[in-house]
Image (cartoon, helix red, strand yellow):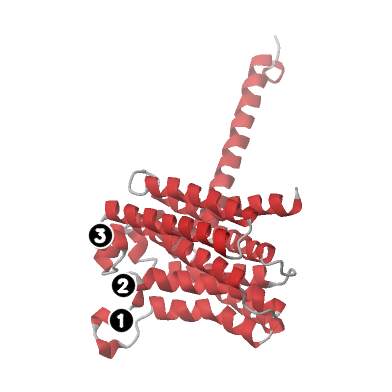
Amino acid sequence: MASKTNDPAAHANDLVSRRAEVSASITRAGTRIKDVLTYSSAYLVFIAMIEVLTVHLVLSLPLSPAPVVVGLVTFAVYAGDRIADADSDALATPERSAFVTRHREALSLLTAGSYGVAIAIALTGGPLALAITLLPGGFWILYASEWFPTLGRRFKRLKRILVVNSTMVASAWAIAVVGLPLAFAEVAVTPLAGVVFVYFLVDTFVNTEIPNVRDVEADAADGVSTLPVVFGIRRTRHALYGLDLFLVAFVGLTLAFGPLTVALAGAILVGLAYALVLAWFVGRTNAPGRLAIAGETKHLVVFALLLVSTTGL
């Protein structure tokens, strides 16, 4: 009689079991990587660097440390914000809140280290580069912390004030994304740079309001006034339509009368068409977190189109 080890059926079952174990291990590893990238905001580092590289490409600037600096600052500010709001985020994003709470110490060290390295690199670009690097952190302190307590509860956190909150976020990142490459290159602001700034400003405002739809209950409970909290989800969706269509009109006008090229306008308009599709899903999807990430990845599309049109790749 053949032994169990020589039994073809047993060998096949053992092989299937091993494959299942390997597949399960790969799935678990993939889930952990996804959790780290999304919950710690690490994926935003890549998006931010792509945005800065887009500015380099559009303005024909020499490569500089600006993408790295903005990426480090992005991680530091967003991870810091998630650490600060871990308790209040438990209602809207319990899994992220649990992840941040579980790894609070490590994330705090990485946050401080990232901003420290960003500042050290920015010093090589001169005073203006340093000032722009410090700006997002300064804005975040005003945005998220209790300030001017003597003015009363209403004015303690800019994060709670309608439109001001998202405008502060959008302004900080638009200045960093567009201004830092210019500072490192030591060139003046041009009309084209102004057009790119307006694009990133409005687009970042839109991307800031999309996740607020997911957080509407938590924001309302915490006294944070966002578009979904004040006007409801349907009107918020209409507002996002309006902002994206404003950018479409703005791009069309600057193409006709300003410094935009056909290639740049085309890439941006494709990205805005993508944004309008995403806006339709606001309040209509069971995966609002994925919708927020999809809004950010629009910049990958714009960058890829620009790369192809300018380099012929």
The residue type indicated by label 2 comes to Arg
Q: Residues within 10 Å of mark 2 (few under 14, many from 20)?
A: many
Q: In the rendered view, does 65 fall on the left or right side of 208? A: right
Q: Amino acid at mark 1?
A: Lys
SS of the residue under disc 1: loop
Q: Gap between marks 2 and 3, in whole Å? A: 15 Å
Q: Which mark is residue 231?
A: 3
Front label number (1 vs 3): 3
> Residue shown at 42%/51% (left/top)?
289
User: Label 2, label 1: how many angstroms apart (C-alpha)?
Assistant: 8 Å
**Residue 156 bears which disc, if any?**
1
| Residue 9 percent coordinates (x, y) | 64, 15
x and y percentages locating residue 171 in the rendered image: 47, 73
The residue positioned 41% from the left and 54% from the top of the image is: 95
- Would residue 164 be visible to someone looking at this image? yes
Q: Position of residue 258 (x, y in %)?
A: 57, 65
Find the residue positioned furthest to the top.
1
Disc 1 packing (10 Å; few <14; some 14–19; many ≥20): some
